[in-house]
Image (cartoon, helix red, strand yellow):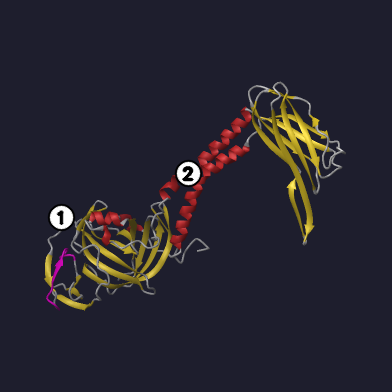
Amino acid sequence: MATVNLKAFPYSEETTCPKCSNMITLYDPDGSDYCVCTKCSSFIHFTSDNRAIIQKQAPPVRQKPVLKLGSRGILKSIDFKVIGYIEKKELSSHYSWREYILYNYEKGYTTLAEFDGHWNYVIGKEFCPDLGELQANTWDFKDYRDTEFSLYNKYTAVTTALIGEFDWDIFTERAQVREYIAPPFMLVLEQGKGSSSADFYLAQYTEAKEIAEAFKTDIVLFPAKEGIGSNQESPLQNQWEPLKKVTPILILILAVAAFILSNVNPSLVIMNRDYDMISDTTKINEFKPFATPYFEIKGTSAALNIRVSSAVDNNWMEANTVLVNEQTNQSWDVTESVEYYHGYEDGESWSEGGQESESLLSHIPAGRYHLNVYPASGDRYRNTVHIIVTGRPVLWANFWIILAALLVYPAFCWWRVRSFEKKRWMNSDYSPYEDK
């Protein structure tokens, strides 16, 4: 067991490799039951009577550790020494990763795990006592600290190479591992480590820069990131979390404001009637122009909505409509086009267009007005047109424009976060996304 409850790191000691006589430095000499010779890779067991026995030959490590054995650093506000380096892989696949055993004189061992350039700071119940209260189950999620962790991976971990010192026979274990994620955290359940009990560990995604600074190591030596880490937090997650809470509130405020404005200054129907159209026999498809009775816009300037409708059927009608101020003779031209066609083709009915059209005129000064209407239609039997003029119309288009503008950035963040999550889960057999 690791030597704990000390006030400082114990003095290191040196031991001699029984095979090659290489001097091996032990940084926790009383707590280390096994070590590996850095020269000949002998896996050495220290017996109860302090004899060093070669238990087996360890394969040499394939990658040079970026954190040197014996290096010291303060990580997560805790003083550590690096005392071991392990290379592991999944028993039934090619996935491999690296682990660094860190030793603290007060609490014992913890781990830094690296896979494809992604790092995790992994602690057990010695550092986080409530982990000891968790129980193993076969569910696809775990609840811990009011957070639901989702199952991401299951595998059997085996050691392929190692150097340094350890307090257990790491070569004999075949840990059955389950990983549950709630980025940036991961719960790791290990079973089959020499006992029937289940051991839980809490991993926190940690940037390489933080580790390099803690152990005074050149960041250039660290492996580059590949892909997305299993519990790597999305770069936009910190922005998305407040956005998804604030955005519904802003939408509600916008809706309430629109409702209040529409009731404080309600729209007013100024004109709503049918007008007869008389065909102009001297011109093709045209009807005689007519003028509507006058109407008044009171108060300050206002917007006007002019809606023209006609019961055209597989035909068209067009009305050039001129709003005329009777005091100043100032005019505003709009052209309303109404087209409606329908039919039956290849066993299916179809239709296009509609029987009404509308235009909006803004900032019309107060005064007395009438409309000059110049109608035309492909239906020479068309004899009526319906005109509705509304003052101060509720401009819901503005509401929808503001709403769309309000949703642009939240929608972008949501899409980026979702895309990030889908890529993360592509490496898992338990993805919640069907179209992985």
Task: Give yes or no for residue 187 being in the magenta stretch.
Answer: no
From the top left corner, tell me how far across and down residue 285 is, in percent: 82, 42
From the top left corner, tell me how far across and down residue 405 is, in percent: 53, 42
Q: Residue at x 37, y 55 (%)?
A: 184
Rendered view: 218 above or below 44: above
Q: Quadrant of residue 231?
A: bottom left
Horizontal side of residue 245 vs 175, given as left or right: right
State the quadrant of the N terminus: bottom left
Q: Does residue 50 appear in the picture of this structure?
A: no
Rendered view: 13 above or below 129: below
Q: Secondary structure at mark 2?
A: helix
Q: Residue at x 39, y 70 (%)?
A: 155
The residue identified by callout 2 is 245
Asked if labels 1 and 2 touch by Cβ distance under 8 angstroms, the answer is no
The residue identified by callout 1 is 8
Rendered view: 332 above or below 132: above
Q: Residue at x 14, y 59 (%)?
A: 10
**Amino acid at dot 1:** Ala
| Magenta part, dominant SS | loop
From the top left corner, tell me how far across and down residue 428 is, in percent: 44, 65
Please give the range of residues in magenta.
19-31
